[in-house]
Image: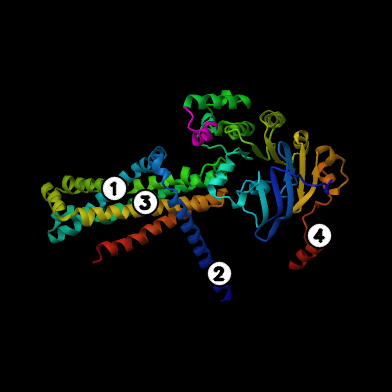
Amino acid sequence: MTNMLAALGRFVLGGLTRLGRATGFGGVLLRRVGTAFTRFRLTLDQLFAIGVRTFLIVVVAGIFVGMVLALQGYYTLVNFGAENSLGVLVALSLVRELGPVVAALLFAGRAGSALTAEIGLMKSGEQLAALEMMAVDPYRRILAPRFVAGFISLPLLAALFSAVGVYGAWLVGVQMLGLDAGAFWGQMQDSVDFHADVLNGLIKAVVFGAVVTWIALFEGHDCTPTAAGISRATTRTVVNGSLAVLGLDFLLTALMFGG
Amino acid sequence: MIAAPLDKDPLIRIRRLCFRRESRSIFDGVDMDIPRGGVTAIMGPSGSGKTTLLRLMTAQLRPHGGRIDVDGQDVHSLATPDLYALRRRMGMLFQSGALLTDLNVYDNVAFPLREHTQLPEALIRQLVLLRLESVGLRAAQGLMPAELSGGMARRVALARALALEPDILFYDEPFTGQDPISMGVLVQLIRAFTDTLGLTSIVVSHDVAEALSIADHVYLIADGGVVGRGTPAELWASPSPWIRQFLDARPDGPVPFHQPGPSLDQELLATDRSR
């Protein structure tokens, strides 16, 4: 019993210590983030590495999620004679929830893990120390452009995910199941509000982008610089990043749509 | 020799340095002076804290006690801009080379120039080519770090470290894992750059022959402190058992062959009982 309590105490203390380090890391990063804008070329390179290279997986996932939503939605709505509302169902699901959340989960798996591995390998190869010794601040030169690129990329990827998902739903609903195209698009246009739905979805994506990129960069910067240490850090990025996205999604949904 | 007075106006002055990793003490009250100019070798057995000392001198690590002054400035109390200003006068050759793996050889050497100067690209090109020529790797300018041998990577890193014409150059185990030719090249380059550019070179190494062949001053560290210092000739003549064991590569002596622990008899009997 005493051992269990001690283990629990160690676990909690370890978690709090890591959270403290991560917060300190985030504070330093935010103070030095200006370089990402003054030397935007560095950020552009990272937008390509982080954003463009996540493009394909987001497009493919978006189209399949949209198609599945349309199939599932149609077979439920048709029982109530409400199949013409399929466009609204799919669009609201994607724009409010699935777009930001699934894009963020894919982002954590594809770009977040790559960021952690890259920074971890730079640490183990003494490249970060070499930058320090060349009087080049790694926060400004390496971390800030990646943070801003992640922050910019995810809202764009989430918007892309939602757009492609709606297209997938149109393919299944209108082209395959024969729904009226006018009703599909018209009802969607009537019921999806730009501020309440699209903008709130984008705000979620901005928050997820900042949090997932922060976690990915922190894990890489904080990792034990060995093969096993980088592997553990990469896993933690995906697990912690995904859990943070899901937890924050609940919180943001409650704030935005709760009342 | 150990009792000889320390330098009056050293470039690096270390006083009462204490550093530990968790509960293990690495340095316990170390005093050291690195003179201006020439090559100072810091030697000692593996695990004696040579690389740690280098990282403490360059403020990559903070000591638990004591003080390190570089050119009169306490490196651990400097604000970040002042520390970076001091580091622009320093270069460091890491054991792995620490080249930026997404840049080729040319861009690695050009990197500090592009970061710290507003020089036009044409002038940067000339400086980079001259630096690469001085380490014999001008023809390798288009190669990526993954395409270089260990010795070539260190020479590129040396060219990069020299790009901003530093006053002090730190070398972390420059000879480890090198073939005889690469080792000879590095030995010659370190001495030549020190003399021609008027640098202060600080070489951390456990390669006795190579380090002593180019050093003007030597510190021998072990067991958390300095166990010997002087010129190479003074060290070779020293009767100190520490120095003799290290220089003569004796397997046993003050640094024991066996890791301290329970005796073999105790261990074997304990194993028998456990069965």
Q: Picture coordinates of residue A163 (x, y %)?
A: 24, 46
Please state which amino acid type lies under the numbered disc 2. Answer: Ala
- Mark 2 belongs to chain: A
Q: CA distance from mark 1 to mark 4?
A: 67 Å
The magenta-colored residue range is B109-120
**What secondary structure characterizes most of the magenta part?**
helix
Observer-nearest residue: B107 or A164? B107
Label at residue A161: 1
Residue A251 visible in the shown view: yes
- Same-subunit check for callouts 2 and 3: yes
Secondary structure state at the residue bearing disc 3: helix
Q: Which residue is identified by label 3?
A: A209
Q: How many marks?
A: 4
Q: Residues within 10 Å of mark 2 (few under 14, many from 20)?
A: few
Within the magenta stretch, is there residue B250? no
Residue at 81% across / 61% down in the picture? B263
Q: Are marks 1 and 3 in contact (CB under 8 Å)?
A: no
Secondary structure state at the residue bearing disc 4: helix
Label at residue B264: 4
Q: CA distance from mark 2 to mark 3?
A: 34 Å
- Same-subunit check for callouts 1 and 2: yes
Residue at 25% across / 63% down in the picture? A257
Q: Which residue is identified by label 2?
A: A7
Q: Residues within 10 Å of mark 4 (few under 14, many from 20)?
A: few
Secondary structure state at the residue bearing disc 1: helix
